[in-house]
Amino acid sequence: MQGTVDGFSYGLVTPLVAYLMACLGGALGLRCTTRSMLVSNSWRPGWLALGSAAIGSGIWTMHFVAMMGFKVEQAPIHYDRSMTFASLGVAIVMVGIGIFIVGYRGAKGTALMTGGAITGLGIASMHYLGMAGMRLNGKLEYNTVTVAVSVVIAVAAATVALWAAGQVRGFLWSVGASLIMGLAVTGMHYTGMAALSVHVHGTAAPITGDSAASLLAPLMIGPLAFLLLAGVVVVFDPLMVMGKPVWTPVENKPGVPARELVAHPPSRRLVLRSRRHSGHQRSRTPQNR
């Protein structure tokens, strides 16, 4: 039997809150990525790791906030705890790989395309792994074309966001990029949900897992607390707001080749000064009789 799917059981509340969560995670993550490009190599891994965790936590929170408004009329939905945690880990790790590539190789060319593709695939993997963690008395089926479109949206959004993070043009630039990223990631989520159809089994069977209220609501406290902590770090770092880089050797910046040291001949003034000084020393030395 075909199940009746409703992705907006709470109206526009869950889509709007989900969008805000995606924007928050994107803003913090992109600012941390931008900050990593303005510091020396010793500080760069920390900022990139913080940015990866912020974006991963933001899109994961966005996904499950949106899922709070999803229901199937004929079957209650439960969630597998291990799969739900795994989706968060996949999001952070794959987003981290993409961000580290851009952070060390620069937001251009092959590095940008590779980092954007990996980050986008991480977003899509988080979504469909989280969907695989649903437990209900039915079978989930997906439209292949719509799934492919959702993956393309995720990759394109991630690539544009990483490119914007690499421009280092101040706080407002990153805010605009995060709004676009939040819109694209949320759009990817609902595009993926549009690809879903549920076939409910005729006979009732016991359902394993936890309900959305008992699992997702407490589970989101951790990522939300982390986003709050990351926000505090960003707010109290003046360079994150002003967008003014600290001085770092050009050799340490991504995408810039190291300079070769060239030996320059001494200037004429320096030679004359050296000769004058040596002559003065000889005039003060007693001569042999």
Image (tube, grey):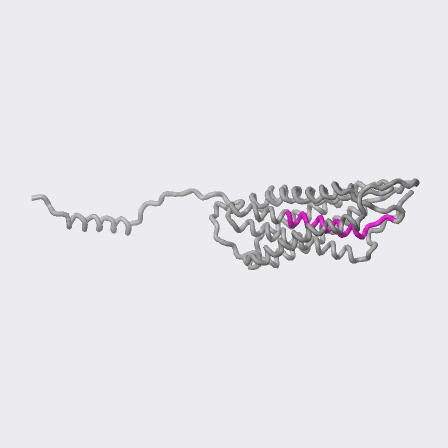
Q: Position of residue 57 (x, y in %)?
A: 68, 49
Q: Nearer the viewer, residue 141 or 65?
A: 65
Main SS category, magenta section: helix
Question: Residue 11 vs residue 47: left or right?
Answer: right
Question: Residue 109 vs residue 13: left or right?
Answer: left
The image quadrant of residue 115 is: top right
What is the count of numbered marks? 0
Farthest residue to the left: give it. 289
Quarter of the image with the N terminus is top right
Can residue 177 be seen?
no
The image quadrant of residue 100 is: top right
Q: Position of residue 246 (x, y in %)?
A: 50, 54
Question: Residue 276 vs residue 171: left or right?
Answer: left
Q: Nearer the viewer, residue 122 or 106?
A: 122
Please check the rendered image and state whether residue 68 is part of the magenta-colored stretch, yes or no.
yes
Task: Tell me what residue is drawn at x 74 percent, y 41 percent.
Answer: 82
Q: Is residue 178 above or below residue 110?
A: below
Write the start and end of the magenta stretch as one range. 53-72
